[in-house]
Image (spheres, rainbow, N blue to C red):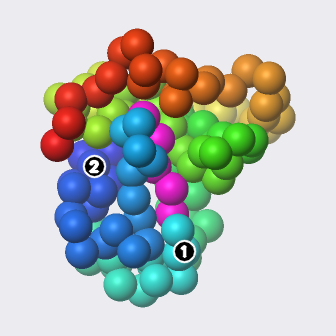
Amino acid sequence: FPKKLMEMLSLPEVSHCLTWQPHGRSFVVNNPEAFMTEVYHKFFKATQYKSFLRQLNLWGFKRITKGPDNGSYYHQFFLRGMPNLVKKMTLVRIKGGARPMPNPRDEPDFYALASFRPLPTI
């Protein structure tokens, strides 16, 4: 899943519905409907957006709930221009299906991080 997602994000023709944030540490689905009908089915069998969100959760992606990155998803090993890092990602199984509630105070500020630890430009 992470490799295919990285591949999708590298395609310029999908930027209208799926794109990296400017700092390259998170991505956002701008148009879920277009994403599912035009892009997702070319890479995966699932047809519902809920299935995509479930995969994100199973692979350990976290959703940002505040600030300029609100609604975007991130993972420490999923960075623009660094596809080799996805090899370190593992499938996470949560017993009982309970997930901790997101805490906006614990969310990273990727814009501040990008100012002193920028990612390679593409």
Residue 91 lies, with reference to residue 106, above or below; the image says below
Kindly state the secondary structure of the residue where label 2 is placed. Answer: helix
Rendered residue at 74%/41% (across/down): 66
Residue 31 seen from this side:
yes
In the current view of this chain or complex, which residue is farthest to the top? Answer: 116
Q: Kindly identify which numbered label has been placed on residue 6.
A: 2
Q: Kindly identify which numbered label has been placed on residue 16.
A: none
Q: Foreground: 1 or 117?
A: 117
Three-letter code, disc 2: Met
Q: Foreground: 120 or 86?
A: 120
Q: Position of residue 19 (x, y in %)?
A: 39, 59
Q: Position of residue 51 (x, y in %)?
A: 54, 65
Number of labels in the image equals 2
Q: Badge 2: few (under 14), some or many (20 or more) residues near its Cα, within 10 Å?
A: some
Q: Which residue is mark 1?
A: 32
Q: Earlier in the sequence, mark 1 or mark 2?
A: 2
Q: CA distance from mark 1 to mark 2?
A: 17 Å
Residue 25 lies, with reference to residue 109, above or below; the image says below
Rendered residue at 17%/43% (across/down): 122
Q: Is residue 115 left or right of residue 106?
A: left
Rendered residue at 31%/72% (across/down): 14
Query: Is residue 26 shown in magenta?
Result: yes
Q: Position of residue 111 (x, y in %)?
A: 52, 30
Range drawn in magenta: 25-29
